[in-house]
Amino acid sequence: MIYKKDASFSYPIFSNTSSSYLDSEFYFDVTSLETNSNEYKFNFEYEISSIFIEELLKAGEASLIIIIQSSDNYFKEIPYGMNEISVPKKRLSLSNKTTLQLHIQSKGDIYFDNCMDLSPFYEVIKDSIHIEKHKLIGYSNIVNYSGNKVKPLEIIEKAVDSKLPTAFKIELSSSTIILKFKEDAYQLKGMVPNNNLLNMYIYEGLSRALTQFINDNIGDEEFIDLTELSGSTQVNDLNQKLLDLMENKGIKELYPENIDEVIALVSNKIVEKYVESVREVGNYAG
């Protein structure tokens, strides 16, 4: 079963929308899908912010389960740290829109008396919290994978135009966000091994594109209910890519005041990676 909406549990649950944990980031993304005559191969990545949950997985006290919902349903336990899974085609028939999610399930009795990750609400009662075998203890965001995975960097296009009146300019085409530079040097290539120095350009481009998305869809409402737009056809390919991207991250609402929060969710630590690159430049300079 894939959890598409928040569910109520009588014990702490680890999910991106739960308040049970102080830091409850359970990030999941499918990076590619390969296929041959016999099987599908899904490549994916995930991050779990809770030390307690991570230790349970490492110790084998909890299992990580991938669930694939399509024309057929498929689930399988995967070793913690694994980033790919092969599924025989005879076990799974992919539809135009395949939905995936990661679950964390208890493999035995779990007690929370030593858990330091819970929110203050559970502090006085955590010694009495007991979860039995085969209970769900966490679930990730949902990934809707149609075969053409949309990631932030894949909707970004870069160009150099010496005729630009300014050093940098953003243009929105019908399908991409174009980052235009007057000189190639402004792209800051080669300054650090993993160049995330471009992230601030990308951030501004995503902000501009989401603003356009809002203008195209909000009408007279105060916010856009993305669940109502699900399955609709957008005015251009760029808006459709943005909608798919937000759906993949489980984002339900969009309005001008939450653009920064949406960018943080869809881009996987874009600011943090930028800061780390700046620090690397400083270390080299020192």
Image: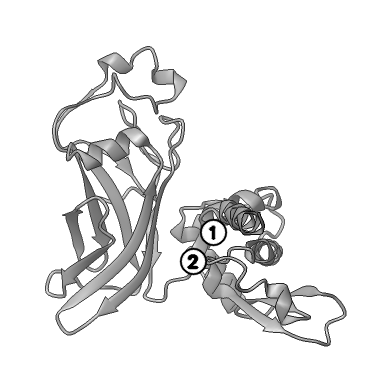
Tag 1 near tag 2, CB within 8 Å: no
Q: Amino acid at mark 2?
A: Asp
Q: Is residue 268 above or below residue 163?
A: above
- Count all numbered tags in the image, as a single digit: 2
Query: Is residue 134 visible to us here?
Result: yes
Determine which of the numbered discs, if any, sits on residue 267 in the image. Answer: 1
- Return the residue nearer the eye: 159 or 93: 159
Label 2 sits on a secondary structure element that is helix
In this rendering, would 76 be left or right of 177? Answer: left
Q: Which residue is mark 2?
A: 244
- Return the residue nearer the eye: 65 or 195: 195
Q: Position of residue 235 (x, y in %)?
A: 62, 76
Callout 1 crowding tier (Cα within 10 Å): few <14, some 14–19, many ≥20: some
Label 1 sits on a secondary structure element that is helix
Q: Amino acid at mark 1?
A: Ser
Q: Residue furthest top?
A: 124
Callout 2 crowding tier (Cα within 10 Å): few <14, some 14–19, many ≥20: many
Q: Position of residue 179 (x, y in %)?
A: 69, 75
Determine which of the numbered discs, if any, sits on residue 194 in the image. Answer: none
Q: Position of residue 117 (x, y in %)?
A: 39, 28
Q: Residue furthest right?
A: 165
In the rendered view of the protein, which quadrant contains the C terminus? bottom right
Q: Earlier in the sequence, mark 1 or mark 2?
A: 2
Residue positioned 31% across, 67% down in the render: 43
Residue positioned 72% across, 56% down in the render: 220
User: Quadrant location of residue 45?
Assistant: bottom left
In this rendering, would 40 be left or right of 269? Answer: left
Q: Is residue 132 above or below residue 16?
A: above
Q: Position of residue 276 (x, y in %)?
A: 58, 53
Residue positioned 27% across, 20% down in the render: 129
Residue positioned 31% across, 37% down in the render: 53
Q: CA gap, disc 1 to disc 2?
A: 13 Å
